[in-house]
Amino acid sequence: MVSIWNLQWFCLHFILWQCNVNYVKAMWPSLNPSTIQLLGLFSDAINTSEPTTVSIHSRAMFKAAIILSQLYNITIDGKYIEWQTIQTGGDLMDSLSSTCRILPKSSIVGIVGPAFSREAEMIATFADSIDLPVISYSATAPDLSDRMVYPAFYRTVPSDNTAAFAMVELFNRYNWTSCIIIYQNDAYGFGGARIINEV
C-alpha cells in the first residue's frame, strides 16, 4: 500500500516538474526582420549562470511587448520593431560602454532600462545628447523627474517622492513624531533619505 502511494506521489511530482520545465524553457517566436530596434538594459551580470528573478521578468516583459507589437502590426515608418539586450551588472561604466558599443552597429530608436537609478542618470544624459528616448522600468530617483536635466527620460514606476509622501501620511495618521532612517550608501539610499527629510 505504501509503495503504491509513493509511486502515485512520484508520478504527480514528475508531471508537475514536466509542466514547470515546459513553461520555463519556452521558446520565443521568430520575429519579423527589421532595421528598427529598441535596446533593453537589464541588471544581471554578463554571462551569469544564475540570473535574478527581477531581471528574468523584466527581460521577458520587454521581449513580449515587442512580439505583441509585431502581432498587432505596430510599425515605425512601416517597419516592425526588434530588440537588442545588454546585461549591465548594475555597473555604470558597463552600462555606458556596452550602450556605446552597440549603437553604431544597429538602428536603435530608444532605450528601455536601465533598472537602477544610478545607471539611469548616466544613460539618460548620454541618450539625450544623441536624441534617444529612455524609459526605465524601475529607476525611482526623484532627480530623474527634472525635465530640464533629463528631458528624454521617462519611467513606468513612480519616483521615491511618492513613497516619501506616503510615509509622511503614515506618520501624520498615527501622530508619530520621530524616526530613525537606515539607508544604503549609494544614490538610492541617499536620495531616499534626502526626500524623506525634505518632506
Image: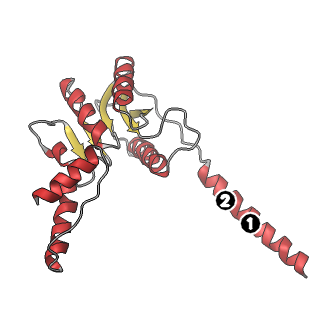
Above or below, comparing residue 98 to residue 18 in the picture = above
Q: Which residue is mark 2?
A: 19
Residue 161 x, y percent position in the rendering: 17, 56
Foreground mark, 1 or 2, reads 1
Residue 175 x, y percent position in the rendering: 14, 79
Res 110 quadrant in image: top left
Amino acid carrying label 1: it is His
Report the quarter where the N terminus lies. Answer: bottom right
What residue lies at 62% left-to-right and 47% top-to-bottom?
25
What residue lies at 37% left-to-right and 32% top-to-bottom?
39
Is any atom of residue 116 visible in this view?
A: yes
Amino acid carrying label 2: it is Cys
Is 39 on the left or on the right of 158, as rendered? right
Is 156 on the left or on the right of 102, as rendered? left
Q: Which residue is mark 1?
A: 13
Report the quarter where the C terminus lies. Answer: bottom left
Residue 172 x, y percent position in the rendering: 13, 75
Judging depth in this view, the residue of 32 and 181 nearest the camera is 181
What residue lies at 32% left-to-right and 50% top-to-bottom?
184
Judging depth in this view, the residue of 47 and 26 nearest the camera is 47
Disc assigned to residue 65: none
What residue lies at 19% left-to-right and 73% top-to-bottom?
170
Work out which residue is located at the far bottom of the displayed protein and give it.
1
Is any atom of residue 140 visible in this view?
A: no
